[in-house]
Image (cartoon, rainbow, N blue to C red):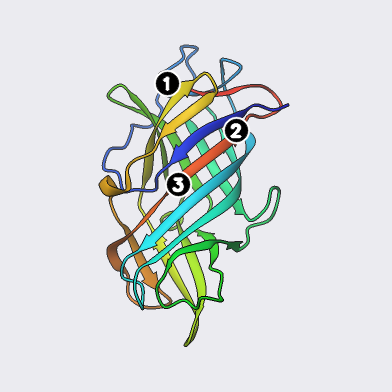
Amino acid sequence: MLRMQIIGLALVSALVMSAAVAGSASATVLPHEWLINGKLIPSPVKIHSLGLVLLTDETFPGGALVVHCKTFGTRTVGPHALGLVEKITAELLGTNDKITCSFDKRGACEASSAPLFLAVNLPWHTELYLLGSEVRYMIMPDGGGNPGWAVTCKTILGAVTDTCTVLLGSTEVKNVTSGVLALFDSLSNANPADCKVGAEAVRPKVGLVAGGITFESPPSGELKAL
């Protein structure tokens, strides 16, 4: 049975970025590397993941919008510190599609309408990096727009889509006996996301996107972040 590894993700703005992975081809294991069975990963390895995402927009029409969603992902880890989020889906091995979520707060969304969730601007680039003594996991753009999510619901005026994005997402990761554990950044300390409804102008720093991801080790062995 494949071992499940746990890593958390809080999509919050970050000002600190690690330098490019210079000299990563060295045989020395650096303190910010993906490993499988204790060995460096020389080329991308595909893995699957289970995600939990919380999105908040405090200025959504009709009041605050807060939704939580369960997602499945296809991504790569490696080479070395790098990775890529390729797909976020409603079911394991699915295609990029809208994911049915639940409301915590619904704003102007109708009570009979379940919110639909869609990852935007995929793929997302990822990187492990060292900040002081912390190993951290960062998500950032991969040549497209900023990583984020679009929520669609029904209102009395018809379907409305709210899109919230952030420039960078970062959270601490630590290895424990059960795998890789991410320490969630608290929502009270999180930097806000930029949101917009439909074609309206962006409302800067009015939302938050946070959550967690459970990574499944590939068949080739046990995944660790060091």
Amino acid identity at mark 3:
Gly
> From this viewpoint, is residue 209 visible?
yes
The residue mark sitting in front, 1 or 3, is 3
Element type where label 1 sits in the image: loop
Amino acid identity at mark 2:
Pro
Quarter of the picture holding the C terminus: top left
Give the residue at mark 3.
Answer: 211
The residue mark sitting in front, 1 or 2, is 2
Cα separation, mark 2 vs mark 3, equals 24 Å
Marks 2 and 1: in contact by CB < 8 Å? no
> From this viewpoint, is residue 121 visible?
no
Please say if 165 is above or below 203. Answer: above
Q: Position of residue 50 (x, y in %)?
A: 59, 43
Q: Position of residue 150 (x, y in %)?
A: 48, 65
Which one is nearer the viewer's eye here, 139 or 2? Answer: 2
Neighbor class of circle 1 (other Cα within 10 Å; few <14, some 14-19, many 20+) is few
Of the two numbered discs 1 and 3 on the same chain, state the one appearing first in sequence.
1
Give the residue at mark 2.
Answer: 44
Give the residue at mark 1.
Answer: 23
Amino acid identity at mark 1:
Gly
